[in-house]
Image (cartoon, helix red, strand yellow):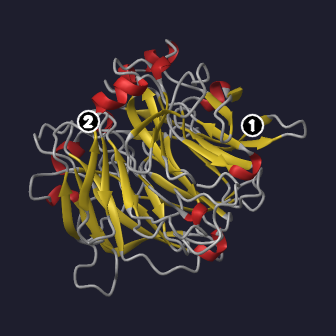
Amino acid sequence: MVEGNGCCKLAGPGYGTPLEAMSGPREALIYVTCVYTGTGREKPDFLATVDVDPNSPTYSKVIHRLPVPYIGDELHHSGWNACSSCHGDPLADRRFLILPSLVSGRIYVVDTKTNPKAPSLHKVVQPDDIVKKTSLAYPHTSHCLASGDVMVSCLGDKDGNAKGNGFLLLDSQFNVKGRWEKPGHSPSFGYDFWYQPRHKTMISSSWGAPAAFTKGFNLQHVADGLYGRHLFVYSWPDGELKQTMDLGNTGLVPLEIRFLHDPSKDTGYVGCALSSNMVLFFKTQDGSWNHEVAISVQPLKVQNWILPEMPGLITDFLISLDDRFLYFVNWLHGDVRQYNIEDPKNPVLAGQVWVGGLVQKGSPIVAVTEDGQTWQSNVPEIQERSLRGGPQMIQLSLDGKRLYVTNSLFSTWDRQFYPELMEKGSHMLQIDVDTEKGGLKINPNFFVDFGAEPDGPSLAHEMRYPGGDCTSDIWI
């Protein structure tokens, strides 16, 4: 990703602008991180290649599996070694997929170019090397830099303390280079990050202390201060912490964070999971940053659950490349939503579809309305299969017309909230998107069942297209 230093002059990876990317070719393959860690099956996690070409005889099937060489990693998020921000750099090549392992601390580098349908392992960055040189552990989000380096947010130290978190730098050969942020400028919690080079700003979000969240969710840990509610504003690219935004009770556990794709915009959103709010952040006239709640998902009053009210739990969201629509999931409620954000401060609900959740018909948990009536969501079967779990990770096609959905959050939390995923595994869906008037509809022809894996049911998490996607590329 380019910091505006003019390095990009000729054609390189990705696209020159977000709007140009929308005219790119239709996706044919998707890489999916799949997890056995935490399921009770002593098998290595793997990267699945899924055929998403409707004209292919293997459409909607896993056509290749790349197992990692270790057990107990918990593959989670992923990112590229190069993206559209260096579209003009002829030496940049979007070849390697970076796979941080949230639990073990390993980082895998996967070659997707030699054979896109059957990626191969290129390198393993060992956790001992990372800890020795940086004291960082629990790697999460990765983004590429214009220098050829890769930057990875790490959520704590080797003992699971949040105060040890920060940002890891790997060089172009994926050797450990050091920390990105200046000494003494680490955030109090870590999770996701995104930056907008024209505004010389990077903003990161905050999940919680690994020692807490790896054991499952405990509401007392929130009261004990083991989960975050802050955004951290850094100068880009020099890594100085300039401002900390306290989101308060309306911004508990802010996870995924995105600027608008238009590189001139000084506006973005963060999904606050526990508060179930989409919070808008923006630059003010004096150059500081502020925030306000843009979308609020009301908790459901419920019966037969662990609490009397159930939050939606917004765990992932993304923005279409033309900055017209925002999509997010409510992992516990079970719905996927589409909002028109042409007026970023006043989003308008444009589409909603139920694809799982804890309050679907057949569940012992029921929601209760204000007048005392009970209700449950109608979740359809797809290809005669019941949908399980709740929508968690999403990925949007470049043209904005197809939204792919998986349903694993983190193995410990999956076991706690959706124990059937341990027995039956995950699945992957495709939702058709109306990009004119708005609207979401499940595609009945697409269903990938990760419960039918040869080594037993697995948990499916993040998705990436070989040619780039809406959740990783940043433009200068």
Camera-side residue: 465 or 142?
142
Q: Residue at x 52, y 61 (%)?
A: 83
Q: Residue at x 63, y 65 (%)?
A: 8
Q: Amino acid at mark 2?
A: Arg
Let me know if residue 387 appears in the view: no
Give the class, few, some or many, for how many residues have Cα within 10 Å of label 1's Cα (few <14, many ≥20): many
Say how many tags the image has: 2
Name the outermost residue toward the right.
Answer: 285
For the N terminus, which image quadrant?
bottom right
Q: Amino acid at mark 1?
A: His
Q: Residue at x 58, y 80 (%)?
A: 23
Instruction: Determine the image quadrant of residue 234.
Output: top right
Q: Which residue is mark 1?
A: 291
Relative to 217, does residue 340 appear above or below in the rendering?
below
Counting from the top left corner in percent of width and height, residue 405 is at 40, 59
Camera-side residue: 70 or 91?
91
- Mark 1 and mark 2 lie on one chain; the one further toward the N terminus is 1
- Label drawn at residue 415: 2
